[in-house]
Amino acid sequence: MSVERLIPLVKSLEKEDIAVLMAVEEGMTSFEYVPLEQVVRLSRLDPQEVEYRLGRLEENRLLRRWIGHYVGYALNYAGYDCLALDALVKRGVVEALGKPLGVGKEADVYDALTPSGERVAVKFHRLGRISFRGVRRVRHYLAWKRHAPWLYRSRVAAEREYRALCLLHPKGISVPRPVGQNRHVVVMGYISGALLAEAIDLPNPRKVLKKVLENVRRAFLDAGVIHADLSEFNIVVDGESVLIIDWPQFVTPTYPSAERLLKRDVKNVINYFKRKHRVVVSLEQALAYVKGERSSLSLRVDRRAGGE
Ligand SMILES: Nc1ncnc2c1ncn2[C@@H]1O[C@H](COP(=O)(O)OP(=O)(O)OP(=O)(O)O)[C@@H](O)[C@H]1O
Ligand SMILES: [Mg+2]
């Protein structure tokens, strides 16, 4: 189902529908498919009402019915999206969803508006749709992990990304502003511009690389955050300004492989600039700079560098 259609659908759901969806969500901590009597128990509604609601929700394809040695129900992504959006709409965080800004393997990002008309981006984490790689540390919701790993992983990813933005943004590091989070969804400030990977003609690539490394340094030194998946695909360039996006896999400096991940981030960025824009800096120098072991950088433009 297209996500744009979800907000009108969310707004058309009645509180009993939401109660039943939430009962199924809760039940998925113990069952892959939640038995009907458990849905009844968890929703605190009477059985007839629950059956009617389950029928409606299934028709709207917000959950799946499974018939095996018992009849059970499970949320799908659309149902989970509805629960997160319902909470965000009720909290006054989101009012309307617009066009997709980026739809890919691990997340769908949509243009959206808040009730006051501010433009925001809504990111639906979708881990477990393909193989999972993002979350490195086991956190809570362990129960969901067993019976509905996609639900658990997507939720942990959203929480981690939101936490990273909350650590980084107040320190003035160039990241989208955190606006809200619920379940597997993160709402953040809308940013314009193009991915670095798609920005072919940078007027001043030296300045862009400098800004990226400056932000990596400040994230590390001022916020204790290492991106851990930094590349030209997670950097947005808008004129002279640079933003770093996509933080769910961040680690802190005390994480066992923090050092290696920081080095990989820096290496990805400097190799890209060398290859595409012929801006050269040594890995040793760039790494010392982001770790605060030196205070400046000297970036050269080398006409012989580059190529693939
Ligand atoms: N705050 C934002 N404002 C505008 N566009 C955004 C914002 N955040 C992300 N996008 C767009 O959505 C795309 C995907 O975002 P992001 O990199 O955070 O997710 P991802 O996990 O890499 O997803 P995918 O698996 O699709 O690559 C970005 O390349 C960008 O075009
Ligand atoms: Mg990305």
Image (cartoon, rainbow, N blue to C red):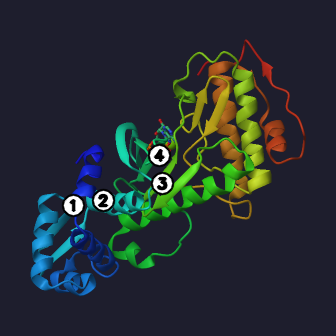
Q: Is residue 169 above or below residue 286?
A: below
Distance of label 1 from label 4 (alpha carbons) = 29 Å
Q: Which residue is mark 4?
A: 116
Seen from the viewer's position, the closer of residues 279 and 21 is 21
Q: Secondary structure at mark 1?
A: loop
Mark 1: amino acid: Leu
What SS does tag 2 mark? helix
Q: CA distance from mark 3 to mark 1?
A: 20 Å
In the image, farthest residue toward the top: 303
Residue 62 is tagged as 1
Distance from the alpha carbon under mark 2 to that under mark 4? 21 Å
Residue that appears at 39% across and 61% down: 90
Q: Nearer the viewer, mark 1 or mark 4?
A: 4
Which residue is labeled 2 in the image?
A: 82
Q: Is residue 268 above or below residue 94?
A: above
Residue 65 vertical position relative to residue 221 in the rendered view, above or below: below
Please give the residue where the numbered disc 3 appears in the rendered image. Answer: 186
Residue 283 point in image, percent of width and height = 77, 37
Secondary structure beneath dot 4 equals loop
Of the residues shown, which amino acid type is indicated by label 2? Answer: Cys
The residue shown at (79%, 37%) is 286
Distance in Å between CA atoms under marks 2 and 1: 8 Å
Residue shown at 17% from the left, 58% from the top: 61
108 relative position to 265: left or right: left
* Residue placed most toward the observer, 295 or 191: 191
Residue 261 seen in the figure? no
* Viewer can see residue 298: yes
- Name the mark nearer the viewer: 2 or 4: 4
Which secondary structure, mark 3?
strand
Residue 42, by quadrant, is bottom left
